[in-house]
Image (spheres, grey):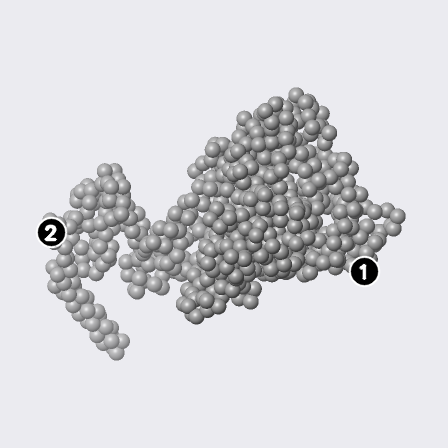
């Protein structure tokens, strides 16, 4: 009986509550609709709170909306719960709104489930200036990686092959098309975003695809539609929890992939959109810190010490722009390409002028006559090497490139003699280079005329020449130790010329923490370890009467100077690899950009050499080819500021007094582009090195290897490498832009770094045989 009484009481309460609710809904319905009739789009009358929920098929709402458009026209209003929605239907209405009223209808509505998915970030569900900037960046980057162009074709066709292979495994039996097709399409965007595809069996990849598909599926479910309308009421629903869990796991996997890409990031090489974003972020962080730092320094210090800071004696020292305290002329410099700023300043202040890099006073020498006179006629006075903080990190007072004094002179003499004995710049090196040409040609042939990045194979080839001279043998291109040595050397040279490292060189006490310096320190440690392991192996197999390479000779003659040997080997490996490889890459890029010059080189090679292998003796009979190689070196301008010099004593030069210990920049770019020496210095013009009869002529202003006491050790070897590699490749291949890119679109903008290789690019090598 008690139970019955309780039940009646509960039922009465429920009925009463329902009646009250219905009454409230009825009373509020008139006030709920606040739109002004005739001015806002028409639509079915909504219920309070529920809106038009009872009229909509939540599993397929688009069908309901399509039917409603037949009644209310191409622009009408519906209420999804309390959310007012204007629906556009039909081609004319949709196109007019999205195209003619693009700004007015251009914002993105971010529903509760989309907030769960993106948390205010990303490119699909965001608004404002940050979204516009991010979209522009994504569009430009994706375009660079061939999205929507023929460059993407190779990736898609490659993936087609994997997809067909999976389908063929079913041998005609029934199968679900979903997973293999999803894996294939996912791999296309993965290759563009991450820079590589995944194996279909990769568990991380499979889970990423599975979660993405599941999230998209449940995000359109009826329960999630209810959550979007009433997020406070339906936040507990199972499908929302599925989305939240999937987002957490997707973020974890993506962060792991990004972390791996960040650890292997090379500033001069973008493998995909992630790399480009990371590089851009690094630049923005440096820029932001620089702005804050400069503002504080400017406000606190500028007025107080401006008179004390300028200590030079007017009329005796070289002129130059007035520096700021502490900052010097920093605000006037393009830190990514300082040589360009220096060239512009030379037009105003002359061929010898002063500049302050932070508090470091630098004298800049510009133009052929001034640079040559200083380095040759005043070789002793300008012959010291200035060792900046980053170069000190790299060499620690040892080696052959960044050292001074009697020990350096003795080491340089020993290295020159030993390298000469091993054929550097002589015909003895020819066999090594031609052998390496064979390996390089084999690697290029494997691309079968498809577009490829020239950087790695050419760098491996040039690295093997110096390796065979230094260690006595070459490496296989797939050797992981060799690949890492080359990668680290390239990365160190690249980041050593970055804006952040320039700041570290100016203010080492302030910028010692920067990421690029940490990259250099880590690379140096690993390089030293690898070189010492190689030296130990050579030491264990050393025969005093047999020198296999420079290391053997050093071990026999200078057994107590292994630290010096380690850094000398490091110097020779990096310098002997980077500059030659960069110049050769410029040569092939220029041939692809100027096919008529490439064909003229090939015609001369065919006429003079024929089908046999080119040799060094052929150079004198190939004037046009020789001119093209020299012009490539000139225009490439690999070391625009040379390596920094320093005065060894007080000197009066060109009427100016320069104190002992002053940093000196011989501006090689001003020599190679000197308008008084070259007819068209800023264009690729092989006739710079040809007389009226078409014969090769040497030019005094051709100084890519610098001059004087600090002239490049490997000039002879580099010239031989460039000649033999270049001619062998042009004999065998025709280099062209990748599909979808014209010759005019090939970019000749150099990459940012300590040297100036070409920016990352792809070329096709089409066999001539």
| Residue found farthest to the right | 545
Residue 658 appearing in the image: yes
479 sits left or right of 310 in the view: right
Q: Residue at x 22, y 59 (%)?
A: 82
Q: At 58% from the left edge and 46% from the top edge, which residue is drawn?
A: 370
Where does residue 5 sit, x and y in percent of width and height? 23, 76
In this view, the residue in front, 583 or 260, is 583
The quadrant where residue 634 appears: top right
Quarter of the image that includes the N terminus: bottom left
Q: Is residue 255 visible?
A: no
704 over 118 or under it: above or below: above
Total labels drawn? 2
Q: Residue furthest top?
A: 607
Dot 1, how many residues are within 10 Å of its Cα: few (below 14), some (14-19), or many (20+)? few
- In the rendered image, the quadrant that contains the C terminus is top right
Taking depth in this image into account, of 745 and 579 the one nearest to the observer is: 579
Residue 94, how many percent across, how many down?
A: 25, 41
Mark 1 = which residue?
A: 560
> Foreground residue, 198 or 478?
478
Instruction: Give the Cα distance between marks 2 and 1.
Output: 97 Å
691 relative to 5 in the view: left or right: right
Question: Dots 2 and 1: beta carbons under 8 Å?
Answer: no
Which residue is drawn at the image coordinates 66% and 54% (left, top)? Answer: 381
Give the structural element (helix, strand or loop) at label 2.
Answer: loop
Residue 522 x, y percent position in the rendering: 63, 59
In this picture, residue 716 sits left or right of residue 26: right
How many residues crowd mark 2 within 10 Å: few (<14), some (14–19), many (20+)? Answer: few
| Residue 37 numbered mark, or none | 2
Q: Quadrant of residue 612?
A: top right
Q: Residue 563's x, y, as percent?
A: 74, 59
Along the polypeptide, which appears first: circle 2 or circle 1?
A: 2
617 sits to left or right of 188: right
């Amino acid at each position: 009986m008690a139970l019955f009484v309780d039940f009646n009481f509960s039922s009465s309460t429920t009925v009463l509550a329902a009646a009250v609710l219905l009454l409230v809904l009825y009373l509020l319905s008139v006030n709920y609709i606040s739109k002004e009739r005739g001015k806002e789009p028409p639509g079915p009358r909504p219920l309070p709170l529920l809106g038009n929920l009872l009229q909509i098929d939540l599993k397929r709402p688009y069908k309901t909306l399509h039917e409603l458009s037949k009644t209310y026209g191409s622009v009408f209003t519906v209420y999804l719960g309390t959310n007012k929605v204007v629906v556009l239907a039909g081609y004319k209405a949709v196109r007019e709104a999205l195209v003619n009223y693009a700004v007015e209808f251009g914002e993105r509505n971010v529903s509760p489930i989309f907030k769960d998915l993106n948390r205010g970030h990303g490119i699909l569900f965001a608004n404002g200036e940050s979204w516009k900037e991010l979209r522009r960046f994504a569009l430009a980057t994706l375009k660079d990686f061939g999205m929507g162009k023929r460059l993407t074709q190779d990736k898609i066709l490659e993936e087609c092959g994997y997809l067909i292979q999976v389908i063929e495994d079913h041998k005609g039996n029934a199968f679900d098309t979903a997973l293999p097709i999803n894996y294939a399409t996912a791999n296309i965007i993965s290759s563009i975003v991450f820079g590589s595809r995944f194996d279909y069996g990769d568990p991380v990849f499979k889970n990423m695809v599975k979660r993405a598909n599941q999230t998209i599926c449940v995000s359109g479910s009826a329960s999630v539609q209810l959550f979007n309308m009433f997020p406070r009421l339906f936040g507990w629903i199972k499908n929302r929890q599925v989305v939240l869990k999937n987002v957490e796991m997707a973020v974890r996997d993506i962060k792991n992939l990004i972390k791996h890409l960040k650890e292997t990031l090379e500033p001069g090489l973008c493998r995909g959109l992630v790399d480009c974003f990371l590089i851009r972020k690094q630049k923005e962080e440096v820029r932001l810190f620089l702005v804050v730092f400069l503002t504080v320094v400017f406000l606190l210090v500028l007025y107080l010490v401006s008179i004390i800071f300028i200590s030079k004696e007017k009329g005796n020292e070289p002129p130059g722009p007035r520096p700021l305290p502490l900052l010097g002329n920093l605000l006037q410099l393009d830190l990514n390409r300082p040589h360009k700023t220096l060239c512009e300043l030379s037009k105003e202040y002359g061929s010898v002028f002063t500049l302050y890099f932070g508090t470091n006073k630098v004298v800049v020498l510009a133009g052929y006559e001034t640079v040559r006179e200083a380095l040759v006629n005043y070789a002793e006075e300008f012959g010291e090497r200035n060792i900046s903080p980053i170069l000190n990190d790299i060499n620690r007072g040892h080696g052959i490139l960044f050292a001074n004094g009697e020990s350096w002179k003795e080491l340089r003499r020993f290295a020159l003699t030993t390298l000469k004995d091993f054929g550097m710049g002589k015909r003895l090196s020819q066999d090594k280079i031609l052998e390496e040409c064979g390996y390089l040609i084999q690697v290029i042939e494997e691309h079968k005329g498809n577009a490829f990045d020239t950087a790695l194979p050419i760098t491996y080839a040039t690295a093997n020449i110096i390796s065979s001279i230094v260690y006595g043998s070459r490496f296989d291109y797939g050797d992981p130790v060799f690949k890492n040595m080359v990668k680290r050397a390239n990365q160190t040279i690249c980041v050593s010329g970055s804006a952040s490292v320039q700041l570290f060189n100016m203010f080492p006490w302030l910028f010692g923490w920067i990421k690029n310096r940490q990259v250099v320190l880590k690379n140096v440690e690993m390089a030293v370890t690898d070189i010492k392991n190689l030296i130990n192996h050579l030491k264990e197999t050393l025969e005093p009467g047999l020198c296999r390479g420079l290391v053997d000779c050093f071990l026999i003659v200078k057994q107590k100077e292994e630290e010096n040997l380690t850094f000398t080997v490091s110097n020779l490996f990096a310098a002997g690899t980077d500059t030659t490889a960069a110049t050769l890459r410029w040569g092939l890029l220029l041939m692809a950009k100027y096919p008529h010059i490439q064909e003229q080189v090939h015609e001369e090679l065919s006429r003079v050499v024929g089908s046999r292998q080119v040799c060094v003796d052929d150079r004198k009979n190939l004037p046009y080819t020789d001119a093209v190689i020299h012009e490539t070196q000139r225009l490439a301008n690999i070391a625009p500021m040379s390596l920094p010099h320093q005065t060894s004593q007080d000197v009066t030069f060109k009427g100016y007094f320069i104190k002992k210990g002053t940093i000196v920049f011989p501006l090689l770019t001003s020599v190679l582009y000197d308008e008084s020496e070259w007819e068209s210095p800023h264009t690729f013009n092989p006739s710079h090195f040809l007389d009226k009869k078409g014969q090769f002529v040497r030019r005094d202003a051709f100084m890519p290897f610098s001059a004087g006491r600090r002239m490049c050790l490997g000039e002879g070897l580099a010239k031989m490498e460039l000649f033999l590699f270049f001619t062998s490749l042009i004999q065998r291949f025709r280099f062209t832009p990748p599909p979808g890119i014209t010759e005019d679109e090939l970019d000749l903008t150099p990459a940012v770094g300590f040297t100036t290789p070409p920016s990352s690019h792809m070329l096709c090598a089409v066999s001539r045989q």
